[in-house]
Every structure is written in C-alpha cells, then in structure tokens.
Amino acid sequence: MTTHKLFLLPGDGIGPETMHEVKEIIAFMNSEGLAAFEIDEGLAGGAAYDAHGVGISDDDMAKAEAADAVLFGAVGGPKWDSVPYEVRPEAGLLRLRKDLQLFANLRPAICYPALAASSSLKPEVVEGLDILIVRELTGGVYFGEPKEIIDLGNGQKRAIDTQVYDTYEIERIARVAFDLAKTRKNHVTSMEKRNVMKSGVFWNEVVTKVGAEEYPEVELDHMLADAGGMQLVRWPKQFDVIVTDNLFGDMLSDVAAMLTGSLGMLPSASLGAPDAQTGKRKAMYEPVHGSAPDIAGQGIANPLAMIASLAMCLRYSFGMVAEAGLLEQAISKTLDQGIRTSDIMSEGMTEVGTNGMGTAVLAEFEILLGEGQE
Ligand code: IPM
Ligand code: MN
C-alpha cells in the first residue's frame, strides 16, 4: 500500500479540537488497513508565533512542501491582535497558500437534508443545495504590490492595496472551474465588478475566451459580484460552479456557508497545478470557518467542516473516491439521527460536543465501510 504523507497544522482556537476528531478517523483508517497515512504535525498561526515569532516557521514550511497533503485547522484570535502585521497568525496561512502555489480554492456549499431547517433561509430555498465556489487564492488584492500605508508628510497617511491579475492566473482558475463543471451540472457563473474595476473587465474577458475556445459545451454566464451575493441568498439553486477572485471569493463563500446551516459545515480544498512529471498536485485542506476564539477550548465546536475537509483530501489527493463518499455519507447519516453540535442545534435534536460528534461520525463511517464489504 502506498504511504501517504499528511502534514497536520491544527493552528489556533477550535483548530486543535476539531483536528483531534480527524486524527481519530485517520488512526482508524490506518488500523483497519484502509490506508497507510504517515502523520506529522506542526505549528501555524498564533501557535507558531508564540513558539517561533512567525506565522509559520521555515521548518514547518519545508514539511508542508514535502507532504502529499496538508490538513489545516484555523488561525488567529484576540491574543495576537497586536502582533506585527508581517508575523500575524494569518500570515502563516497566506504564506502556505502562496509558497505552495495553491491557486485553486474549492469551497463546496452542500445543504445536508437534515439541516435545511437550520439555515437562516427558508428550507425550500436551501433544500438539496449543491454549489461549488472556485476561488482564486494566490493573487488579487491579497498579494498585489504595492501593499502599504505611507506617510504623506502633511498629517495625512495613505493606505494602498493592489488588485492585480495576469492572464495566466485567470486562465488557470477558469479551467479548474470549467473542468469541475463538466463533472457536475455543466454550468459556470463568473463573478467580478467589471462595472468599476479594470481587473473585472479583464477577468470577464479572459474567462469568456477560455470558455468559448476550450469549453464551448459548458454554459457560462457572468454576474456582477454584488448581484451575485444577492442572488446567493435569494435563490442559490440557480448556481452550479461560481468562479471568482480572491477577495470576492472570500466574501461570497462565507455567504454560501450560511446557506448550509452553519459556517461550521463548510470544508475546502486548495490545490496547486499538477506536477509535469508526476501529475501530483500540492494540496491543503481546511474548513472555511475561522478559529472561533469565543468558543475555543470548551469542546463544543462543530468538527464536521474539518472532517469533510479530510473527505476532500481523500478524494482529491489520494484518489480514494469511495472512502471520501462514505465519510460524507457518514456525516449525513449522523445528522439524520438528530445529532447536533450547538451551532446547528434545534428543538428535539440531541446536542453533543466536538468529541461526541466526531465519535458518532466515525461509528457511522465504520458501519458504512462494513456494509460495503458484505
Ligand atoms: C478564509 C479566511 C482567510 C482569508 C483569512 C484567515 C486570512 O477568511 O480562508 O476564508 O481571508 O482567506
Ligand atoms: Mn474567509
């Protein structure tokens, strides 16, 4: 059996608690001979700052580079609010994305049937929802230079962020979106602000060209990003794949997350380009939720987004498509049984903590695997 090197970066806040549940599933898969995962663990975010004075150490960066996949928890919290900008917890996450060149961020928003009532929207609006946000992750205003606050010398300062995209960056993220659409409902919606931003005009142009020349069979439409946000809460089922830039993708994916009942439900995959020789992609998997410092350490955080991130890892990094599907089914079945963490709790359901939820999913996973072998 091939050994898969997994590098875990639990990070801060609820990261370590939710990662613990994933470690249990990994240990189970190893002990059952379903996989041979080799696990190593490092520090990211505030935890790395406390130990090394940076958002992630060079040592841990090297381990992330060498791993087959990285599993990431969450970073940040009020404890580090006043650390220098360059070494803030988020800088660790951004360095991982940039140095590993993880330009394609896949954020699926799926509404599990049992959670349709937990959404802040009407059940009929979200029932059966299955959309995929493809967010560009290594460009745009997150990384564009200049990025600075300068002193104008007249008692005024000026803050500058730069939104910048080159042709190849838009082409490659568009291709990821079109390729994924072909495995789904064959429909891509591209979102930008071409009515205000040059980068939006250009984004629109490049996506249109890639679509027409390389994917004529995929339906493509365009929406201004603000209207897109509105449509996401009005009638989200009109979308299949949404492709958008780094900043709009950040915002729109938080909106999409809430459609599914809780920010605690949404996993993500961040992928690089396939290696020319091996075909392997660098990859990192992380929940979309943040470190939730307000509930950290209480054992009540929802581990489902972290567990679903492991499922994405099985699917995209290791080709374990069947196991990934079963793990996702285990999540769905656990919810069907009425088991809930506090963020998705509703009347008549059984409230459990992080560990209770993790254990319940693992038990379902075990049953489903057993059924598969019969
Ligand atoms: C996300 C997060 C990050 C981002 C933060 C923590 C830097 O909000 O992954 O969506 O803005 O990309
Ligand atoms: Mn975000």
Image: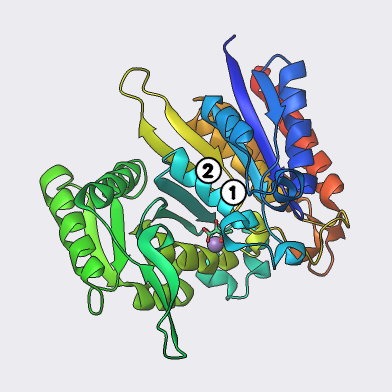
Task: Determine whether label 2 and label 1 are within 8 Å by CB.
Answer: yes
Type of amino acid under label 2:
Leu
Q: Is residue 75 above or below residue 202?
A: above
Ligand 2 shows up in the quarter that is: bottom right
- Local packing at callout 2 (Cα closer than 10 Å; few below 14, some 14-19, many 20+) is many
Q: Nearer the viewer, residue 149 or 260?
A: 149
Extreme top residue here? 1
Look at 74% across and 52% down and name the residue there. 12
Q: Is residue 101 above or below residue 275?
A: below
- Local packing at callout 1 (Cα closer than 10 Å; few below 14, some 14-19, many 20+) is many
Look at 76% across and 55% down and name the residue there. 13
Q: In which quarter of the image is residue 333?
A: top right
- x, y percent for residue 14: 76, 54
Q: Read off the residue under disc 1.
A: 92
- x, y percent for residue 334: 75, 46
- x, y percent for residue 368: 69, 30
Look at 49% across and 25% down and name the residue there. 319
Q: Quadrant of residue 234?
A: bottom left
Q: In this view, does 125 lie above or below 338?
A: below
Quarter of the figure that contains the C terminus: top right
The disc at residue 96 is 2
Q: Is residue 202 left or right of residue 354?
A: left
> Can residue 34 be seen from the camera position used here?
yes
Scheme of colours in the image: rainbow
Extreme left residue here? 213
